[in-house]
Amino acid sequence: MNTIAAPSSNPTFGFTLQEYQALLIETLIKYRCVGFEVLDEPDMLRDNFCILRHDIDMSPACALDLAKLESALGIRTTYTVLLTGEFYNPFEVSTCKTIQAISALGHDIGLHFDATWHGINSEADLEDAITWEANMLNRLLGPVGGGVRMFSFHNTTPFSMSCKQTHYAGLRNAYAGVLQEQVSYTSDSNGYWIHRSWVNVLNERPARIQVLTHPEWWTEKKGEPAEKVCQHLDSRSRIVWTGYCDSLASTGRNNKTGVVDAFAILPALVPEDGADLLYTWLCGNCEEAFIDLYCRVERKSRRLCRKYFRTALRASSNQVNAVLSDCTLRLDPIAVLACIANENIETLLGCSLVRYQSLKKLRHGLVHGSASAPKATLQTHFNLLALLMQNLVNWASTHTLDATGAVKLTTRNMPKTLKATGDALPNWLKKHMKELDVSDGTLRKFLARYPNAFAANGKSSTL
Ligand SMILES: [Zn+2]
C-alpha cells in the first residue's frame, strides 16, 4: 500500500473510496478500533484506541460502500441513522434494507439525533426525545438492526455540546464529556477537514482518537463536495422516478409523458443513458434534452462516417478529424453518411427531407440562441429525433454496419482500387461537393488550412 500524502500537500485528494481504504489501513497499523462500548468501561482511558463513526446525513448507499470496505478489513465501526433529515427516509423499504445490510456486516447502528428538530434545550426533554426516536429506529430495523445503543448529535449546538453525560435515555453519547476532553477528534463535515485531517491526526498519534466521517463524501470518483451533494440528490430522484414508472407498468396503468415515441424508443436504443435523457426532458429541460439527443444522432453518424473514411478511403486520423469537425466546411454528418451509403437522406432516416430540414432549423435556432420553441414544437421534434435515430440504427444494422461502425462496412460503394496515397478523401469530397453543399472555393480553402494532413503527397493541391 502506498503511503498517503497529507491533503495539504496533495491538492488532488478527493475523498475517494480508495483513499478511505488507505486511511483505514494506516489507522489499523497504529490503533485498535473499538466501538462506543468503551464508554461503559470505568477504566476506558487505560488503553489507546480509535473510534470510527459515520453519521449518515445524506447517503445510506455510500454508507453501505464504506461498511463493506471496512468489513473486508475485519473492522467494526458505528453508523448513525438520521430519522429527521431531508436527504433520505429510513422508512423507505430500500433504505431500511440498506441500513439492515450495514448491521448484518457486523457494524453498530446508532441514532443520529437532531435536537433542533425537537426544539429542546433541557436534558430531561433530551431523554424523552431520544427515547422516542430510538424506539422508532429499533422497531424499524427489527432484530437485524442489532439494537440501538448509542447516539450522536446532528448539527451540534452549544446546548448539545453541553450535554456531557456518557449516557442519555440508556444510549451512549458520542459527545460525552470524557470523549470531548480525553479523545482527539476530527471530522470531514461539509466534505473537507475543517481543523486537521485524518492524516494529520495519525501523524500526531495521540493516545486515543475519534474519527467522524460522513459517507456521502467518500465516493468512487473525486469531486467537489457541492458536486457530490447534487449528484446524491439527483441519483435519489431518478431512483424514485424509476420506481414510479415500474409501479405504473406493473399495474398496467398508463404513464402519460407527451413523448410517446421517445419514451418507447430511447431506453432500449441508448441503454447507457436513454432513460436519463428522457428524465431531463420530463423535468422541463426540453431544449437541453432536444439538443443532447440531436448531438447523439450526429455522433452516431460521425462514427459511421469515420469508419468508412478510415477503412475504405485509408484516410489518416488527421484527415478524418479535419473533415468531420472543420467549422467552415460544416459538413452535416447525416448528409456525409447518405453520400457514403449512396442513399438519399429520406431512405437513410425514414423521414421526409422537409421534416429533416425542420429538425436542423430548430437545432440551429436553439444552439445559436436565435429562437426558442413552443413546447408542442419541441415535443414533435423530440419524438421525431428518437424515431430518426432508431431508423438510422436499423438502417446501419441492415447494411452490415452497427451503430458504432464496428462491423465491417459494405464494399459496394468503395473505390475499386485502394491505395494509401492520402488523396482518396479529398477526391471523395470533390466528387460529393454538390450533395454536401460545399463550393469549390470552400473546399480549396479547407484543404489549404490543413497542409500537414492533405498536402503531404502534393496531390491535393491539384483540386
Ligand atoms: Zn449529521
Image (spheres, rainbow, N blue to C red):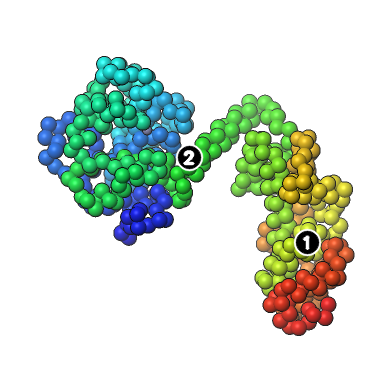
Residue for point 30% across, 47% down: 196
Q: Residues within 10 Å of mark 2 (few under 14, many from 20)?
A: some
Mark 1 close to ligand 1, CB under 8 Å: no
Q: Position of residue 305 (x, y in %)?
A: 74, 63
Against 132, is 156 above or below?
below
Q: Earlier in the sequence, mark 1 or mark 2?
A: 2
The answer to whether residue 337 is seen in the rendering is no
Ligand 1: give its quadrant.
Answer: top left
x 73%, y 57%: residue? 301
User: For the residues marked 1 and 2, what is the alpha-carbon distance in whole angstroms?
Assistant: 41 Å
Q: Does residue 222 appear to the left or right of 143 in the view shown?
A: right
Q: Amino acid at mark 2?
A: Val
Asked whether residue 88 is in view, the answer is yes
The amino acid on which the numbered mark 1 sits, given as a three-letter code, is Leu
Q: Nearer the viewer, residue 260 or 101?
A: 260
Q: Secondary structure at mark 2?
A: helix
Residue 206 x, y percent position in the rendering? 19, 47
- Give the residue at x 20% y 50%: 205
- Quickly name the residue at label 1: 331
Quadrant housing the N terminus: bottom left
Instruction: Estimate how packed mark 1 is, as few (under 14), some (14 to 19) or many (20 or more) residues with alpha carbons within 10 Å.
Output: some
The image shows residue 217 at horizontal and vertical percentages of 41, 43
Disc 1 is placed on an element classified as: loop
Instruction: Please state which of residues 408 and 454 is positioned toward the viewer in this rendering.
Output: 454
Apparent side of residue 245 relative to residue 154 in the rendered image (left or right)? right
Which label sits on residue 229?
2
